[in-house]
Amino acid sequence: MHELGLSRSIAAIVSENANGRAVKRVCVAIGPLACVEQRSLLFCWDLVTESTGLSGAVLEFVDADGDTFVIKEFEFEQETA
């Protein structure tokens, strides 16, 4: 199940770039030839992010071409004063 490794990689990249800010949403583009099962990736995402700074961050998907697999964007929680 390479989706577990993919989830770990996504979480590491997003965490590094978040610089401690709370992440609300992560959007990943996946092409039909990427050999990634979205349901498995969602399941693994929840396991990997549980009890971390990414806990509760929603993983979303957009369609892409070919074997594309890329983090398109991520959104931070609004800071309250």
Image (tube, rainbow, N blue to C red):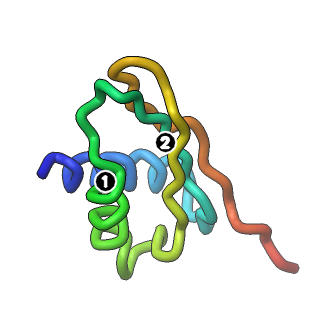
At horizontal 46% and vertical 56% (from top left) the residue drawn is 15
- Identify residue type, mark 1: Ser
At horizontal 36% and vertical 71% (from top left) the residue drawn is 46
Q: Residues within 10 Å of mark 1 (few under 14, many from 20)?
A: many
Q: Residue 75, how many percent across, how many down? A: 67, 54
Residue found at the very far left of the displayed protein: 1
Give the quarter of the image for residue 11. Answer: bottom left
Of mark 2 and mark 1, the one earlier in the sequence is: 1
Is 54 in front, or is 38?
38
- Identify residue type, mark 2: Val
At horizontal 39% and vertical 24% (from top left) the residue drawn is 68
Q: Mark 1 points at which residue?
A: 7
At horizontal 61% and vertical 68% (from top left) the residue drawn is 22
Q: Would you say 79 lies left or right of 30 here?
A: right
Q: Mark 2 points at which residue?
A: 28
Q: Would you say 10 lies left or right of 33 here?
A: right
Residue 20, labelled with which disc? none
**Element at label 1:** helix
Q: Residue 21, how many percent across, how many down? A: 62, 64
In the rendered view, would you say 71 is above or below 40?
A: above
Q: Residue 58, how many percent across, how many down? A: 54, 64
